[in-house]
Image: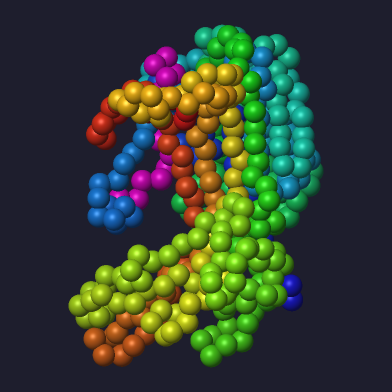
Amino acid sequence: IEGNNVEVRPPLALTTYPGFPCETNHSALDLANGVLGQCYDVRGDAYNGGRAATVDIMPVSEMPADRPITVVFSKSMDINSFILGQTFAVEKVTQSGIGAGTVSVVESVPGRLEKNTQRVRFFPDQPWEPGAHYRYTLASSESSGACSPGSYSAICDTDGLALKTDLLEGLNDPDGGNDPLVIYFTATEAVSTVFTPLRNLPIRDTNSNFLIDCNPYDSSKGNRAFENTDDCLEPFAHEGSDAEGWAPSANATKLAVRNQTAQASALAGGNVPAQVGCDAGEGVSCPRSKFIYQTYALNTEVKGPGTYDPDPTVEGDEIEGILVDLYPTLLATSSISVFTKIKLAGLIPLQEETVTNTQVLRMRYAKDDPSCTGSNCARNSLIP
C-alpha cells in the first residue's frame, strides 16, 4: 500500500471474561443483588429509527472459583504494558450501598499474568472465594505518553496506541484523560461445564483497523480508496462475479438498501435513489463494495449432551445435540458508505455520502423467562 494509506487504529477488548467489554455506568451498581449497570451507549430516538431507545441493565457476572480472568484483544498488544497492580489491577471488594461510590477495596488479589500478543489471563494464587465480590481494571488513557516504554499508564498495542474503552467517542477521539475498563464479578463454586473461547477466522481486516486498506483510485467521481477493490492490502476473496453478484465471504455481511430508495425531505426530493458502496441513481452497481467485515471473539459454555426446545409452545420440535451457551459481547465491523441522490432545493442533483465508520454490535443477554414479551423482561441469562 502506497505512502500512508494504512490508517492505524487503537485496540479493543473483544471479550472480557468475566464481564462485558464496555465502559459501564455503575451508578446503579448493586453487587448483593447482581445489578451491574448499563453501557454508555444511549443515544436517544434519533439513533433508533424514531423509536424509544432500549436500555439493558446488565447483570454482575459470576466467576467459578477455579477459572482465570481472560481478556482477548482485537490486535497485537505490547505485552510489556500488562503490569499487574498498575495497568491490570485485580481487587477483592465489598459494598455498603448502591453505586460505585459505595464500593471499598478489601485487598489486592495476588496472582500472576499470562501474557500473549492478543490475550492476557490472570490466575489468582488462591481460588476465588465463593460469594465474594471482585473487580478488575484495565487501564486506558488518551493522554500523550500513556504508551511510553518504561512508564506505561495504559494497556497498549504494538503500534503505541492505548486500549480504547469508550467506543462512542470514536476511535480517533483524543480528548485526553483516563478511561479505565472496570469490571465487577461475584465468585461461585466450581462448575462441571467447560468454558471454551473462540475467535473468528478467517478475517479480511487482518490489521484490525476496521477498514479495508486499498490504494486510492482515480475516477471521475473523486479519489475514494474504497472504489479500488483490486489493489488492496487485504484481498477481496469472495465467490461469484461482477455480473451475477458476489456472495459474502467468511465473517462478512452483504448490505443493501431496501427497494434502493430512501426517504428525504420534500426539498431534497422526497423518495430518492439510494445505494450501498457507490453513487446512487447513476446506473452503476459496484458489486464488490457492499460488504462489511467482522472482527470478534466469542466465549462459550459447553454444557454437554441435551435437548434444545426452540419454541416451548410447539410440540415435537426438540433438537438433540450438545448444549452450548454464549456469553454476550461486542462485535466490531469495518466501515462502509451509503449514497443517496438528492436534489438541492428540489432541482440540483447531488450525491450525498454517509460513512458508517466502525460499527459496534452489542449482543444482549437472554431473557430469564423465554416466554416473556414486551420491553420489561429481565435479561440476565447467557444466550442458549
In the rendered view, does 198 fall on the left or right side of 379? right
Question: Camera-side residue: 154 or 72?
Answer: 72
In-front residue for pair 381/286: 286
The residue at 56%/14% (across/down) is 187
Where's residue 384, x and y in %? 47, 28
For image coordinates 71% across by 29% down, the residue present is 121
- Residue at point 62% right, 12% down? 192
Specify whether residue 100 is in view: no
Q: Residue furthest front?
A: 316
Quadrant housing residue 124: top right
Q: Is residue 368 above or below residue 263?
A: above
Foreground residue, 185 or 50? 50
Residue 239 in view, yes or no: yes
Which quadrant: the N terminus? bottom right
Q: Is residue 35 magenta?
A: yes
Asked if 93 appears above or below 225 in the picture, the reply is above
Image height of 52 relative to 305, above or below: below
Q: Is residue 34 found inside the magenta-colored segment of the image?
A: yes
User: Please, which residue is most extreme toward the left here?
Assistant: 266
* 262 sits left or right of 190 in the view: left
Residue 49 pos. (x, y %): 29, 56
Q: Position of residue 204 (x, y in %)?
A: 66, 58
| The residue stretch that appears in magenta | 31-44
Count of numbered circles on the image? 0
The residue at the point 42 percent across, 85 percent down is 282
Name the residue nearer the viewer: 105 or 116.
Answer: 116
Q: Is 7 on the left-hand or right-hand side of 166?
A: right
Residue 120 appears at what percent x and percent y? 71, 34
